[in-house]
Image (cartoon, grey):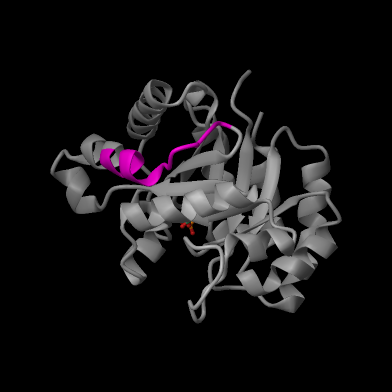
Amino acid sequence: MAPRRLVAGNWKMNGDLAALDQIEGIADAADGARCEVLVCPPALLVHQMVARAAGRIRVGAQDCHGNMSGAHTGDVSAQQLRDAGATHVIVGHSERRADHGETDAVVQAKAAAAHATGLVAIICLGETEEQRDAGRTLEVIASQLAGSVPEGATAANTVIAYEPIWAIGTGRVPDAAQIAEVHQKLRSDLAARLSDGGHVTLLYGGSVKAGNAAEIFAIPNVDGALVGGASLKAADFVPIITAIS
Ligand code: PGA
């Protein structure tokens, strides 16, 4: 079984009720796509996006708490996201790691909470430019992977997204050999750790656009993409969905 292919949009802190009008165009492309299509809007919009998507695309969230419920003002639980109709949740995005001081241990607890409720956890990792320049990329990636993937992870409940921090929102993308090297490392570390690690979906994220998607999808061990800015409008996102073969 080859890894499932997935093109996922991360709307970040963008979008409102009017933005849900983008969903029809995305769902039209998803109907004929050779991949699963997922959009992760702000948590507030998940429920209404699920209704608009009518099962034609998957809807996910961008974060969840590591606990199931309790006194955590302002947080959202994996169970609540599941209840609203989400199927996936992104955890450990570099913006959460930076803005909210999330460590690998915190990310691991969030992924475990996602699994416990039946959500697929999309676990993000990636190096800074400084780490890459110092030749530490593979070491950083391996350590984030080891620390962020919880016990009980499988190819069915876990997706890994490699997002070099210096490529997010910058228009800069690593070259094909650099992406291939990291994805090969992720694949071999996952295969060593999980019995079905060879089947885990591995996404690349960071400045994926219509113009570079096909080239990125052709890289070995790249099973799809996590797309930020270019997922906000159907006109930008659809060509990325259709670029996957
Ligand atoms: P970008 O963001 O596509 O806007 O670079 C990707 C991400 O942060 O998930």
Q: In which quarter of the image is residue 106?
A: bottom left
Q: Can residue 208 be seen in this view?
A: no
Q: Is residue 44 visible?
A: yes
Q: Nearer the viewer, residue 7 or 210?
A: 7
Q: Which of 82 and 207 is in front in this view?
A: 82
Q: Quadrant of the N terminus?
A: top right
Q: Residue at x 49, y 64 (%)?
A: 65
Outermost residue toward the top? 1
Q: As drawn, is 16 to the left or to the right of 210?
A: right
Q: As drawn, is 99 to the left or to the right of 140?
A: right
Is residue 153 located in the magenta-colored stretch of the structure? yes
Residue range of the region highlighted in magenta in the rendering: 143-155
Q: Residue at x 65, y 47 (%)?
A: 118
Whether residue 109 is situated above or below residue 184 in the rendered picture: below
| x and y, in percent, of residue 170 in the image | 39, 59
Is residue 176 located in the magenta-colored stretch of the structure? no
Outermost residue toward the right? 54
Q: Residue at x 22, y 37 (%)?
A: 139
Q: Nearer the viewer, residue 182 or 219?
A: 182
Whether residue 203 is situated above or below residue 27 in the rendered picture: above
